[in-house]
Amino acid sequence: MQKTLPKIRGKKPNVGLYRQAVRCGKLNCRCSSGELHKGYFYLMWREAGKQRKRYVPLRFVAELRAAMDRIRSRRDSAEERTRTSLAELREVRARLRAL
């Protein structure tokens, strides 16, 4: 039984967590007539032009969402620092040109 999140090799900058409805493949199941099983979560990303996905067990979904939110907020704050630094740099250049 899997006790940790699935490992994804390499750097994945654009990873998304998606809920997907699936068909189990049993002949007498309700999903064979079109009513799919819902609530299965997958990490999806592109790698070398191909879409990849990994199943995420339900018990890890909240933890994974929290981790993705932390990563997103760090990235957003880093982008904000970059914008601020560039604005300050432009201001300094403008002052130097005025001299």
Image (tube, helix red, strand yellow):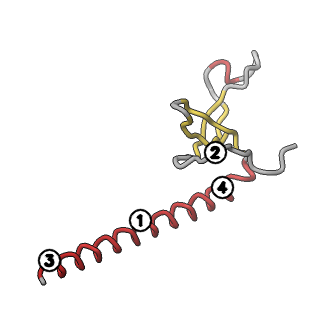
Cβ–Cβ under 8 Å for marks 1 and 3: no
Quadrant in which residue 18 is drawn: top right
Dot 2 or dot 3: first in sequence order is 2
Dot 3 or dot 4: first in sequence order is 4
- Nearer the observer, disc 3 or disc 4? 3
Q: Is residue 78 above or below residue 5?
A: below
The x and y percentages for residue 66 are: 62, 62
Alpha-carbon neighbours of circle 2 within 10 Å: few (<14), some, or many (≥20)?
few
Residue nearest the viewer, comparing 10 with 18: 10
Dot 1 or dot 4: first in sequence order is 4
Q: Amino acid at mark 2?
A: Gly
**What's the CA distance linking mark 3 and mark 4?**
49 Å
- Identify the disc placed on residue 10: 2
Cβ–Cβ under 8 Å for marks 2 and 3: no
Residue nearest the viewer, comparing 49 with 25: 49
Quadrant in which residue 19 is drawn: top right
- Residue topped by disc 4: 64
Q: Amino acid at mark 3?
A: Arg
- Residue topped by disc 3: 97
